[in-house]
Image (cartoon, grey):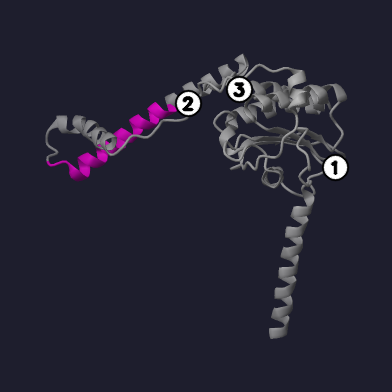
Amino acid sequence: MEKLLKTRYFALVFVMLMAVMTVNADVPPRPANANELVYDYAHVIDSASLAIINDSLKNLYVYNKTQVVILTVESLDGMDKFDYCQEVFEKWGIGDKKLNNGVLILVKPKQEGSKGQVRIHTGYGAEGILPDLLCNKLVEDSMIPAFKEEKYGIAIRRAVDAIVPAMKGEYPQEVADFLQEKKKDSIIAAIVYSIFYILICGLIWYFFFMPTKKDWYSIMASPLIAASISSSSGRRSGGSSWTSSSRSSGSSWSSSSSSSSSSWSWGGGSSGGGGAGGSW
């Protein structure tokens, strides 16, 4: 019996080690030179789109050191797209180490017997500029429709055309309208929540802590008293601000300036798992 348990124990350890080794082997190794920001290992991006996307991302890096990396792979080798992105993000060190302003766009083309997969994965410092709701909108409304027509270059260009100005604090009008609408929804939700919270606190105060419960105005005053107690204990912010933040102006740039400053190293940035993905 003891021998059997030992055998099972070593077998379990062996399987776990093999699983870890397999996971590490699935992710492409970090490129030695970060001179390019588009790594089309699946060979699905047309040459014209590839040049435009790479040039746009290089210009963004020159502007404020934001690294947006495009990665296409033929297979995720059984990994979930979230885990795959997280592994690549950490292994490559996308984005500046202090700013954590990296963004990874992963694309796995649709193949016979397997769905296409896409995910926009953001670093800690990019989550406020590219919230999950916006990433989901880009994936569902801009990228997947083009992916279904096998227009991979166009799909990625659409995402880049929205992400690049956003990372410079200049949201396209459509994106700005979307964020403004979501901001209004969050304000309404915060108001409804606050009213509900005050009423509940008032009822608790009335039934358990009110010195006298005979006067009708005691009932009316209970929510106000509870609100005063709640506000005095500390206020909480009611959501993120979607206003465009001003960024360092920097000097103007062009295609020639990006090509002359296109050499850099991976910044060592990390991600908390923000972003959104989808499949088709």
Pick the front one: 216 or 239: 239
Q: Nearer the viewer, residue 39 or 222?
A: 39
Image quadrant for the N terminus? bottom right
Q: Where is residue 16 in the image (x, y as percent from the top left)?
A: 72, 64
SS under mark 2: loop
- The earlier-in-sequence mark between 3 and 1 is 1
Whether the magenta-drawn stretch holds residue 200 is answered as yes
Q: Up-down: is 112 above or below 246?
A: below
Quick check: 65 above or below 253?
below
Q: Which of 185 and 138 is in front in this view?
A: 138
Q: For the residue marked with disc 1, what is the amino acid?
A: Gly
**Is residue 19 something that shows in the picture?**
yes
**Mark 2 belongs to which amino acid?**
Ser
Closer to us: mark 3 or mark 1?
3
Closest to the camera, between mark 2 and mark 3, is 3
The label on residue 241 is 2
* Residue 35 coordinates in the image, percent (x, y): 77, 34
Task: Kindly report the distance in space between the C-alpha atoms of the residues bearing marks 3 and 1.
Answer: 40 Å
N-terminal label among 2 and 3: 3
Quick one: quadrant of the C terminus? top right
Frontmost of labels 2 and 1 is: 2
- Tag 2: Cα neighbours inside 10 Å, few (<14), some, or many (≥20)? few
256 left or right, relative to 193: right
Q: Mark 1 points at which residue?
A: 113
Name the residue tied to disc 3. Answer: 168
Report the magenta residues as a range: 189-211
Question: What is the chief secondary structure element of the magenta stretch?
Answer: helix
Q: Distance between the residues labelled 2 and 3?
A: 16 Å
